[in-house]
Image: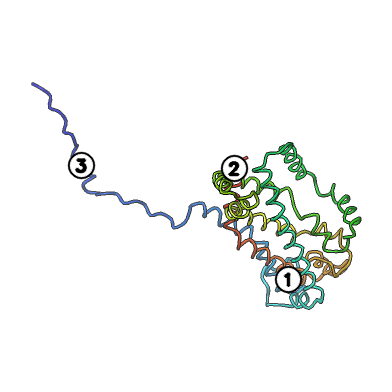
Amino acid sequence: MTATSAPPYAAPTVAARTTGPQRPGRRLPFSPWHLLLAPLALIFAVPLIWLALSSVMSNAEINRFPPALWPSHIDLDGYRYVLGNAMFPRWFANSLIVSVATVVGNLVLGTLGGYAFARMQFTGSKLLLALMMATMAIPFQLTMIPTFLVMKDLGLIDTLGALIVPSLVTPFAVFLLRQFFLSLPRELEEAAWIDGCSRLRVLWQIVLPLSRPALSTVAVLTFLSTWNDLTWPLIAINQEPQYTLQLGLTTFQGQHHTQWAAVMAGNVITVLPVLLAFLVAQKAFIRSITSSGLKG
């Protein structure tokens, strides 16, 4: 008597026949990480929201204890005080001139320096790069006096040039662009060299169109640091017509009385260009961070 072999396919069980095929679970229309990131984003946005609400409060409401979290009525006296100040448009224009000039300088000089470190091998290039990167570890408090003396010898104190010249190129801009250039394939540039293109033409026509994410990142970060800078303008500028926006807002804060509604309104106006700059370049900013910081 021989044993019977098992059938090649087992018959479905009663449970399988009754339940039928299982349907896939319903997926969320967004990433599960958003459940964590959304509350965190709201927490970080609370100071900005309170700043906007305080700008439409009266000084009495802002100074009240406990502080008011919501304005009892819309009060635009702070904005009238700021916009009615004859020097405010001048301060805004000064900040814009300094920020735009610094951004342009970092894009041009940072691109040339970063491309030289990324593609040109010359004697002492690695040592020079290491020394340049080491300057990023030096605190500004150690360099502000020598910088002030240099600007004084150049006759730039109390002018916008004193705010522009020291920041025309930064080690961070050179390093970030160098890292991005290293991530680009050399074959594109070598093909252009074979066709007779010069190095500058290759940089202008081949490399720069591919480097828009890195250039946008440098532009945004440089604009943010220059627009929000208060320490160096406080040292280099003494005349009120040459004030930047951040320095001009300090005049609303007196020793015995502070126009807090005007301070809040001025800060709201100051933050708007920063938010606009980031919103315009946020996609390029993220692409640059994810691609430029991985290759050494």
**Is residue 63 visible in the rendered structure shown here?**
no
**Is residue 254 visible in the rendered structure shown here?**
yes
Q: Is residue 72 above or below residue 3?
A: below
The residue under label 2 is 294
| Residue ID at (63%, 51%) | 203
Farthest residue toward the left? 1
| Residue ID at (88%, 49%) | 146
Pointer 2 local density, CA inside 10 Å: few below 14, some 14–19, many at least 20: few
**Horizontally, is 217 left or right of 164 in the view?**
left
Q: Nearer the viewer, residue 244 or 110?
A: 110
The residue under label 3 is 12
Q: How is the image coloured?
A: rainbow
What is the spatial separation of the Cα atoms under label 2 and label 3, in whole angstroms? 52 Å
Q: Quadrant of residue 77 in the image?
A: bottom right
Query: Residue 178: image x %, image y %?
Result: 65, 46
The residue under label 1 is 265
Pointer 3 local density, CA inside 10 Å: few below 14, some 14–19, many at least 20: few
Mark found first going from the N terminus, 2 or 3: 3
Question: Helix or strand or loop: what does disc 1 sit on?
Answer: helix
What is the spatial separation of the Cα atoms under label 1 and label 3, in whole angstroms? 73 Å
Residue type highlighted by circle 1: Ala
Closer to the eye: label 1 or 2: 2
Q: Nearer the viewer, residue 14 or 249?
A: 249
Residue type highlighted by circle 2: Leu
Which quadrant of the rendered structure holds the C terminus? top right
Residue type highlighted by circle 3: Pro
| Residue ID at (74%, 72%) | 61
Q: Is residue 64 above or below residue 137?
A: below
